[in-house]
Image: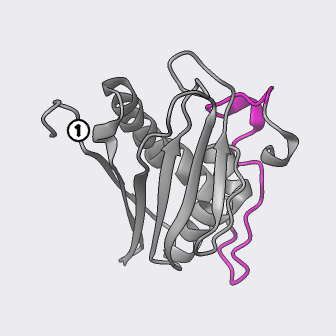
C-alpha cells in the first residue's frame, strides 16, 4: 500500500489446461484480445504502440487506453505500458502503469500470472475496477478464448468464443478498425 491507502498493484494467477503456446495466442492475437478484453490495435512487436477502446461509461474515463509493448518473449513473458486517457482533454496524461504477463509450463497446462502495477496514481475506484475486471477476465473470459485456439501446430484463433453481444463492453461509438 502507498501512503494514500491505494494498492500499488493487482496480481491475478490462473491455471489453464492448455499449452503456453495456446495461451500466448489468446494474449497476442488482436481478435482474441478483442473478445476477452477490449477492442484494440495490438500487434505482438517490441515497441509497438497500441490502443484499447470501449464505449464511455460513467466513472470509466475517456474510453481509450494507450499502451506500448515494452518486453516480449514468446510464449513466456510480455510487458505493456498502460495509460488510461483522461475524459477531459485538458487534463494531463497520468503516469503509465505496467501490465506484466508471465506464462509458465506446468504439468498438463500453463500457469498465468498477471501483475498490473502503478495503480497508486489512480483513484481508488479505478483500482477497485482493475482488481474486479482482471479477476473476471483471467478466470472467466480468457479461458473461453483459449479454448478457441487450435491445439495443433497452427495455433490459429477462431473468432466466436465470446459473441460481440455477450462481451463485457459495448462498441457503438468505437471506430471500425477496433471492432473485430
> Magenta includes 42?
no
**Residue visible at 44% across and 46% down?**
139
**Residue 75 x/y as whole percent:** 51, 78
Above or below, 87 relative to 103: above
Viewport quadrant of the N terminus: top left
In terms of depth relative to the viewer, which is nearer, 97 or 11?
Answer: 97
Q: Which residues are magenta?
A: 150-173
Q: Which residue is mark 1?
A: 7
Estimate how packed mark 1 is, as few (under 14), some (14 to 19) or many (20 or more) residues with alpha carbons within 10 Å: some
Quarter of the image where one finds residue 158: bottom right
Residue 160 on image: x %, y %: 77, 48
Q: Is residue 179 above or below residue 55?
A: below
Give the quarter of the image for residue 168. top right
Tell me if residue 171 is in the magenta stretch: yes
Across and down, in percent, residue 68 comes to: 56, 61
Q: Main secondary structure of the magenta part?
A: loop
* Position of 131 relative to 82 (above/below): above
Nearest the eye: 156 or 107: 156
Residue drawn at 69 percent across, 48 percent down: 34
- Position of 55 with respect to 132 (left or right) is right
Q: Residue furthest top?
A: 58
SS class, disc 1: loop
Amino acid at each position: 500500500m502507498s501512503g494514500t491507502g491505494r494498492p500499488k498493484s493487482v496480481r491475478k494467477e490462473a491455471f489453464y489446461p492448455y499449452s503456453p503456446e495456446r495461451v500466448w495466442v489468446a494474449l497476442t492475437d488482436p481478435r482474441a484480445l478483442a473478445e476477452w478484453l477490449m477492442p484494440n490495435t495490438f500487434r505482438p512487436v517490441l515497441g509497438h504502440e497500441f490502443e484499447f477502446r470501449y464505449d464511455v461509461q460513467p466513472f470509466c474515463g475517456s474510453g481509450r487506453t494507450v499502451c506500448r509493448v515494452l518486453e516480449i518473449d514468446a510464449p513466456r513473458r510480455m510487458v505493456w505500458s498502460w495509460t488510461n486517457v483522461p475524459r477531459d482533454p485538458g487534463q494531463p496524461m497520468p503516469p503509465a502503469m505496467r501490465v506484466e504477463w508471465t506464462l509458465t509450463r506446468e504439468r498438463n497446462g500453463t500457469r498465468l500470472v498477471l501483475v498490473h502495477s502503478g495503480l497508486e496514481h489512480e483513484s481508488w475506484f479505478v483500482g477497485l475496477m482493475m482488481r474486479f475486471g482482471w479477476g473476471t477476465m483471467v478466470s472467466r473470459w480468457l479461458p473461453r478464448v483459449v479454448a478457441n485456439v487450435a491445439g495443433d501446430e497452427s495455433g490459429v484463433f477462431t473468432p466466436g468464443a465470446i459473441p460481440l453481444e455477450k462481451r463485457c463492453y459495448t462498441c457503438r461509438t468505437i471506430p471500425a478498425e477496433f471492432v473485430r
